[in-house]
Amino acid sequence: MSCRTMLIILCAFLLTACGAVKDEAALRFAFETAEPGDVIEIAAGAMMVSRGLTLNTDGITLRGAGLHETILDFAGQAQGAEGILVNASDFTIEDLTIQDTVGDALKINQGRNAVIRRVRTQWTGGPSTENGAYGIYPVQVDGVLVEESIAVAASDAGIYVGQSKNIVVRNNLAEYNVAGIEIENSQDADVYGNQTLNNTGGILVFNMPNLPDVGMRTRVFDNDISENNTANFGREGTAVAEVPSGTGLLINANDQVEVFDNRFSNNRTAHVLIASSYDESADIAQSFDPYPETIFIYENFFAGGGDAPDMAELEALRTAMFGEDGRLPPVVWDGLVHPERAEEGVLPANLAICIGNLAETEFLNIDMAGGFAGASLDTSPHLCEHAKLGAARFSAG
């Protein structure tokens, strides 16, 4: 019997005899030898991990002893672009913390049915451009559930779901990230029951060019979106580096977004920003559509905010329109529309930006195309409703 065979048998014996994994060598062995249906349990306590971990087997559950009890500490990470990288379907991870990784904390790449439950990702030194970009990061996954998790101090997004579909992000806490929660180029997403506090931007619903998937049909509801005023510490050149500090919700170049029953407070730029990604040098006839359309915002609660916009143009508008002590309205739109779809700057009913409860909800069109000269509080083009979206289809077993 070779030494390698003896080592494998010994490691397997130790895993079986000792129960939950207690050190990096045993955890790495469990990842490398996992078979579909395996449950890898990690014991309580802090485990130092020196190299990134990769899982390539479908049907695995990775389980700690509790979100605050099991800590995978990558502070001394010497190798690997992520903390944990999963290239597999039907994956569940729950009840543990991943902290201080060199790059992304948890990346789930492609596949189907990813469940992230009671997972904390964090950089313990607080907000810093040197932190990893993403905390919880499923990308190109059909079927995503992120629930009861915590994401802290990511230099891009704490919870990011990209190029995916059938998504539920619920009952999480995201704080001190550049973007608390981001849904990008994804379809059929429900984002609800979350707390986004002290980020640069609380929740982002984005479409970006040069990606194969186009985002649409996102519902953002029943969230607490407050005090998202942390200075932007994103890496220069990234999309989130342009997000103004003080943004509650940013809808950018995305269609069919429904926003309701949220509680916004003290986001100092604006509670809701609706913006295009139009670049005058780009050809709008190409596949990327930079204009947000079919947006429906209603029955939200707004308090404070809008008093110190982190954009020179918006600050100038605030003082010019509302005085030195005034506030921008809760909902701010750049006013840009597709020139071939709008008539005299007004979108047809099926594409309109619709704002409900206008008696309580003020709305500002800043007229970016006109250099802000025609900024208007006229709500008449937005006294409309859209058919409500259905619930996202993914559900945990």
Image (cartoon, rainbow, N blue to C red):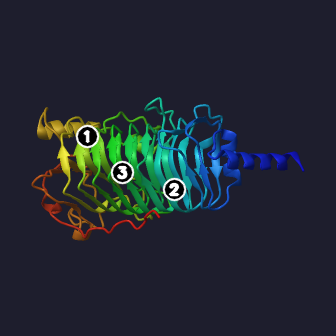
Query: What number is the disc on residue 171?
Result: 3
**Three-letter code for the amino acid on which mark 2 is drawn:** Val
Which quarter of the figure has residue 218?
bottom left
The answer to which of 356 and 87 lies nearer the viewer is 87
Left or right of 212 on screen, residue 199: left
Disc 2 and disc 3: Cα gap in Å?
A: 20 Å
The secondary element bearing badge 3 is classed as loop
- Disc 2 designates what residue? 139
Left or right of residue 15, residue 160 in this image: left
Q: What element carries label 2?
A: strand
Marks 2 and 3 in Cβ contact (< 8 Å)? no
Marker disc for residue 267:
1
Which residue lies at the image location 35% right of the left edge and 39% below the top edge? Answer: 200
Amino acid tagged 1: Asn
Q: Residue 15 carries which label?
A: none
- Image coordinates of residue 126 in percent, x first then y, are 44, 31
- The Cα atoms of the two marked residues, 1 and 2, are separated by 29 Å
Q: Which amino acid does label 3 sit on?
A: Asn
Residue 161: x and y in percent read 45, 54
Query: Looking at the image, which residue is at 25% across and 52% down?
Result: 262
Foreground of the two, 262 or 396: 396
Q: Which of marks 2 and 3 is nearer the N terminus?
A: 2
* Image location (x, y in percent) of residue 236: 46, 37
